[in-house]
Image (cartoon, helix red, strand yellow):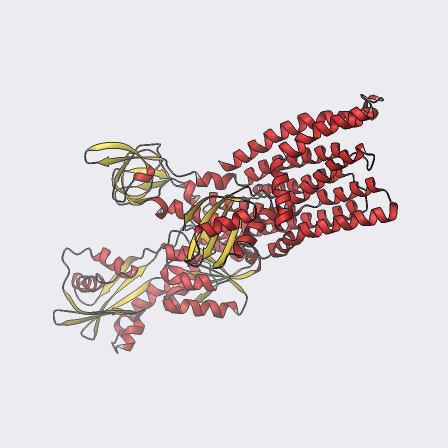
């Protein structure tokens, strides 16, 4: 298990953060997602084999962009 | 700061949108305003279409793009509704060329302009909501003046290493966590602990990064840097909390998820229905657009996070860190507050208060301190400090008897130190000290008995002073009707004496460290329990309780286990944390109520055709602004 913190661009409403959360949860190996609309940040807990690229793709699929990632 | 950029972005959009929309409004209403048409109908239609185009498709491009994308990929959001509403309205303008519908293209521009205005005001309100948190994020020092070799040099904070000696002049920020190696000063720690009184620092005092040195020059050896510092931990904790879920938000969240598709369907139904019954396509479109733009998942979605944000900020200022949003909701159900004694109610630094000896006192202390020197227990340290020996005797066969005492051999003499339970266990007669023990324990001291070769030779009484504000905090909790309970490893008599001094009514004594958890489980059968504690062995109890309140001056592990962390280790923080939680929860409930009520009233109004699309959009914008502003009102509450 590992944890990554994401900074996400473009989220400006509650359904935005819900979309990002929904999309990230469909990534195989992702266990826990919590997105803060206010801070435009998210915490993702996932299996070790999930790459940051996978997360970025998932965020992009929902229509937003990952600004930066940080391992926790 | 990102929030500022967002505000700026909306502001410039707002200016441009209205520059183009105001002429449209004048054209549309010229008949009513000036009593005559400014231009003929064809010219008016063309100019409206020309003016509205940039408002919707250029200034509103981001909204249109994300919205349409959402419609295609099924990741619907707020923008999808606005995009669909404005695009449909704009298209009617083109259709009206062929006299198929009335022209709503001006309305499209007005909807977009009001949407942008709403977002602008909302972004300001949201910026205000996160003000304190943003301040916290930027609290850290940027540079440090380190001493390398004989040179003083200014380096960026990221280059400071553990072990570097940092020079901090009066008025300067202490760059990172460390320990004073030279100098004396007082330090303002209020930004971290909420404690307004400056704290005196001298050699060996620990200092916290981001606090402000007041009057002397301090030389500080860095002990923690980067993400290991106290401030970094606080920031991490507060940030993580923002994403944590509060149970009451669940319903709103599940509504938010299906909200947009439901509204889309409703809008289509409304359109079909109106068209079927009235045959008036223009009116049906207008009403369908009103339904699209009036519905607002934002108010529902913002209700909880904004209140939590404001609350976290208010708490952080006072040294109350909310780690789990859930605690805010659970707090109002709490009936019992259980306290760990050492380090929570008391200072956690026991001191020797009396020695009774049947041998030479120096001999007693020499024996006791030599054995205790090998233990890390706070009581042991108190004795070692008190004895203050120059040389310690060699101890063989040293053994820690967990929760009871110690034993070891010095020379040929077997020394056992511990509580009366241990003496009974070892069949050592302590009769001659019984009355002294009674006296000490009756006034809140803990007695350690010392025996040599199976014969008791003396007692050392140790007491742990009560924190100044414990009494006040507990009195307030009692007055509010909480059941206050103290859990301690002390024996019944000592524990009761201390409990009486601070005003705690119930005592659970003789609890071994690993039994604390069981005691919490037992208490939980009688009602919801908040546990206040520090120390490594409190972590399981903190986790098990309904709300775990960790004293932040304690160890990192306990902080990890707490739902709420008190950075300044004062029990008055418990009172404030309870008040803050309750006020925040009330605010969240209010917000959710308004957000629900708004949608429940507004959507049927739009469906029934009583609202003009522009009025619908204004109502929508107001609903999210109301929720965020209401969250900001939380600041007025005193905590």
Residue reaching furthest right?
B278
In this rendering, position of residue B127 left or right of residue B97: left
| Residue furthest to the front | B98
Looking at the image, can residue B587 be seen? no
Which residue is found at the position 80% from the left and 32% from the top?
B97
In percent of width and height, residue B369 lies at: 20, 61
Closer to the camera in the image, B386 or B301 = B301
Residue B429 versus residue B507 in the image, above or below? below
How many numbered badges does the structure rendering display?
0
Q: Position of residue B478 (x, y in %)?
A: 52, 58
Residue drawn 71% across the image and 41% down it: B85
Find residue A1 and report its horizontal and vertical position in percent.
42, 59
Residue B164 position, x and y percent, is 25, 41
Q: Residue furthest left?
A: B411
> Residue at the location (71% across, 37% down)?
B618
Left or right position of B612 against B135 = right
Up the image or down, B366 lies above or below B271; here it is below
Q: Is residue B20 visible?
A: yes
Relative to the observer, which residue lies in front, B96 or B565? B96
Left/right of residue B37 with respect to residue B112 in the rendered view: right
Instruction: From the viewer's side, name the closer residue of B266 and B251.
Output: B266
């Amino acid at each position: 298990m590992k944890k990554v913190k994401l900074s996400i661009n473009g989220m400006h409403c509650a359904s935005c953060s819900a979309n990002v959360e929904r999309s990230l949860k469909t990534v195989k190996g992702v266990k826990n997602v919590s997105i803060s609309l206010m801070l435009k940040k998210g915490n993702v807990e996932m299996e070790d084999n999930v790459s940051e690229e996978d997360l970025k793709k998932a965020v992009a699929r929902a229509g937003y962009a990952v600004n930066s990632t940080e391992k926790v | 700061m990102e929030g500022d950029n967002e505000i700026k972005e909306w502001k410039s959009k707002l200016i441009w949108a209205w520059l183009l929309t105001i002429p449209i409004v004048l054209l549309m209403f010229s008949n009513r305003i000036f009593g005559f048409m400014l231009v003929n109908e064809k010219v008016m239609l063309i100019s409206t279409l020309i003016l509205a185009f940039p408002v919707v498709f250029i200034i509103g491009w981001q909204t249109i793009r994300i919205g349409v994308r959402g419609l295609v990929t099924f990741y619907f959001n707020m923008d999808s509704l606005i995009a669909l509403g404005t695009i449909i309205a704009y298209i009617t303008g083109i259709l009206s060329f062929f006299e198929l519908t009335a022209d709503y293209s001006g309305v499209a521009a007005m909807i977009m302009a009001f949407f942008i205005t709403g977002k602008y005001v909302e972004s300001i309100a949201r910026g205000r909501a996160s003000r304190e948190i943003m301040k916290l994020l930027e609290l850290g020092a940027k540079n440090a003046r380190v001493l390398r070799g004989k040179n003083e040099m200014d380096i960026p904070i990221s280059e400071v290493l553990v072990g570097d000696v940092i020079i901090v002049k009066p008025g300067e920020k202490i760059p990172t966590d460390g320990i004073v190696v030279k100098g004396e000063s007082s330090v303002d720690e209020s930004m971290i602990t909420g404690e307004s009184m400056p704290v005196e620092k001298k050699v060996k005092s620990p200092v916290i990064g981001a606090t402000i040195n007041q009057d002397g020059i301090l030389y500080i050896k860095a002990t923690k840097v980067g993400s290991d510092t106290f401030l970094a931990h606080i920031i991490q904790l507060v940030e993580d909390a923002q994403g944590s879920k509060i149970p009451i938000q669940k319903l709103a969240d599940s509504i938010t998820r299906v909200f947009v598709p439901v509204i889309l369907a409703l809008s289509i139904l409304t359109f079909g229905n109106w068209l079927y019954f009235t045959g008036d396509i223009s009116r049906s479109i207008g009403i369908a657009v009103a339904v699209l733009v009036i519905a607002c998942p934002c108010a529902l979605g913002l209700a909880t996070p904004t209140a939590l944000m404001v609350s976290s900020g208010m708490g952080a200022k006072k040294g109350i860190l909310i780690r789990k949003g859930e605690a805010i909701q659970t707090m109002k159900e709490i009936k019992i507050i259980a306290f760990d004694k050492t380090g929570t109610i008391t200072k956690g630094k026991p001191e020797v208060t009396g020695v009774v000896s049947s041998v030479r006192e120096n001999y007693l202390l020499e024996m006791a301190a030599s054995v205790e020197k090998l233990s890390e227990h706070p009581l042991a340290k108190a004795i070692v400090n008190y004895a203050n020996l120059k040389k310690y005797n060699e101890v063989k066969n040293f053994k820690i008897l967990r929760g009871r005492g110690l034993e070891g051999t010095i020379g040929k003499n077997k020394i056992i130190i511990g509580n009366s339970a241990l003496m009974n266990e070892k069949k050592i007669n302590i009769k001659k000290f019984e009355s002294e023990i009674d006296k000490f324990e009756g006034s809140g001291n803990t007695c350690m008995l010392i025996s040599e070769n199976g014969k008791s030779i003396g007692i050392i009484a140790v007491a742990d002073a009560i924190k100044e504000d414990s009494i006040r905090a507990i009195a307030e909790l009692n007055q509010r009707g909480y059941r206050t309970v103290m859990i301690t490893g002390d024996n019944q008599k000592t524990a009761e004496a201390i409990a009486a001094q601070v005003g705690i009514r119930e005592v659970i004594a003789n609890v071994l460290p690993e039994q604390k958890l069981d005691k919490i489980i037992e208490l939980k059968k009688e009602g919801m329990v908040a546990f206040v504690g520090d120390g490594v062995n409190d972590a399981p109890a903190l986790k098990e309780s309904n709300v775990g309140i960790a004293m932040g001056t304690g160890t990192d592990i306990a902080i990890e286990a707490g739902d709420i962390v008190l950075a300044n280790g004062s029990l008055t923080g418990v009172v404030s944390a309870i008040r803050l939680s309750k006020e925040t929860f009330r605010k969240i409930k209010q917000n959710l109520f308004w957000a629900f009520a708004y949608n429940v009233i507004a959507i049927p109004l739009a469906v029934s055709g009583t609202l003009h699309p522009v009025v619908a959009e204004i109502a929508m914008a107001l609903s999210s602004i109301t929720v965020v502003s209401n969250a900001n009102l939380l600041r007025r509450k005193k905590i």
